[in-house]
Image (cartoon, rainbow, N blue to C red):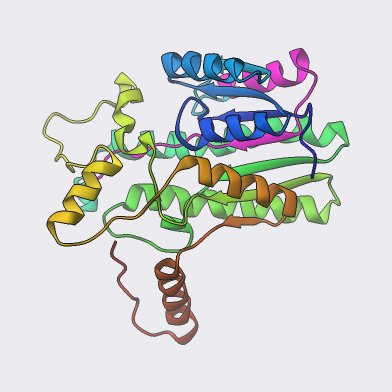
Amino acid sequence: MQNFTNKLAVITGGASGVGRSLAFALGAEGARVLIADVDQPGLETTQKALIERNIDAHAQFCDVSKPESVEALAAKAFDELGGAHLVFANAGISAGEAGQIWEYTQADWQWTFNVNFWGAVNSINAFMPRLAAQGEEAHFIVTSSGNGAFIVYPDQPMYSSTKAAVTALTEALHIQMINQSSPVCVQTLYPGPYIVDTGIFDSDRVRPEEFAKAADAPDTGIHSADDMRKIMESFGLELKTTHPDEVAQIAIRGVRQGHFWITAMNPDTEQKVRARFDSILTGSALPIPTL
């Protein structure tokens, strides 16, 4: 897809971060946007800002962990707004992991998988049949992460596990669509090339009560990219970050190219990926990645 004019782009996790930047970037390309999020105040603020930029913007509350909520979002896109041609299954959270794997609570595991993995499954179930039935060129893009898909950092096993699963899920869907000669192009977005400065570090702001963090849960001390930057500076290290706007432009370029992998890696990440796959191919010791 080269021209986005008047195409409807549906974006989950659209109130902030990468989702918000996608909405502005696609709107600037002439697309109509339907942003969805559990952050109702953030959703309203972003929609207002989009409209002020003369972007045809719509918004709807959506909890991607609940099938009926994603189904309602798809119904709005197709029954009220005339159909979608770009769907970004972008919503994601981080539960603030700290300590040993066996110390994490069931609530932490369930919340992380409900949003990151089941959110992708629910989005596939709600949107893919409708996209396929249109019989027109369309793109379904799932936001994954190099943390889990390419490299596994030992301090984020829950997040990494969800993103490894999301990548496998989306790759299987991509191959199914190819085998069916479907006009729907399935792709994965890997934000980067550096840590993206988003609100994912403060995901507890949208954490539901049913998955409340345990009172005695250890605090990572990292609730923003600035927190991580300060910690690394205390060790004499520099943290490089990527603005969500840059990720949005990488995503748009990836949609136009039509390849499965939409990614931009920095040299350090490339080296770590090569080392990991070399260890797989040679059966040698697993390299231990660090930030």
With 24 as the anchor, is 93 left or right in this view? Answer: left
Say which of 185 and 284 sits in front.
185
Say which of 167 and 35 sits in front.
35
Q: How many marks?
A: 0
Q: Is residue 59 visible?
A: no
Quadrant of the rendered structure where residue 121 is? Answer: top right
Q: Does the magenta-highlighted stretch encompass residue 95?
A: yes
Give above or below for 66 relative to 239: above
Query: Which residue is at a point 44% across and 44% down the rendered structure image?
Result: 243
Q: Tell me where residue 117 appears, x and y as whole percent.
A: 49, 41
Give above or below for 28 relative to 162: above
Quadrant of the rendered structure where residue 148 is? Answer: bottom left
| Range shown magenta | 68-97
Query: Which residue is at a point 47% across and 41% down the rendered structure image?
Result: 244
Q: Tell me where residue 86 appears, x and y as whole percent.
A: 71, 35
Give above or below for 264 relative to 132: below
With 196 as the anchor, is 23 left or right in this view? Answer: right
Which residue ends up furthest to the front in the rendered image?
53
Query: Which residue is at a point 11% across and 34% down the rendered structure image?
Result: 216
Q: Tell me where residue 1 appears, x and y as whole percent.
A: 79, 44
Say which of 194 and 76 sits in front.
194
With 210 as the anchor, is 221 left or right in this view? Answer: left
Query: Which residue is at a point 66% across and 24% down the rendered structure image?
Result: 33
Give above or below for 163 relative to 210: below
Q: Is residue 137 visible?
A: yes
The image quadrant where one finds the C terminus is: bottom left
Q: Does the magenta-highlighted stretch encompass residue 151?
A: no
With 107 as the anchor, is 271 left or right in this view? Answer: right
Q: Tell me where residue 78 appears, x and y as whole percent.
A: 76, 20
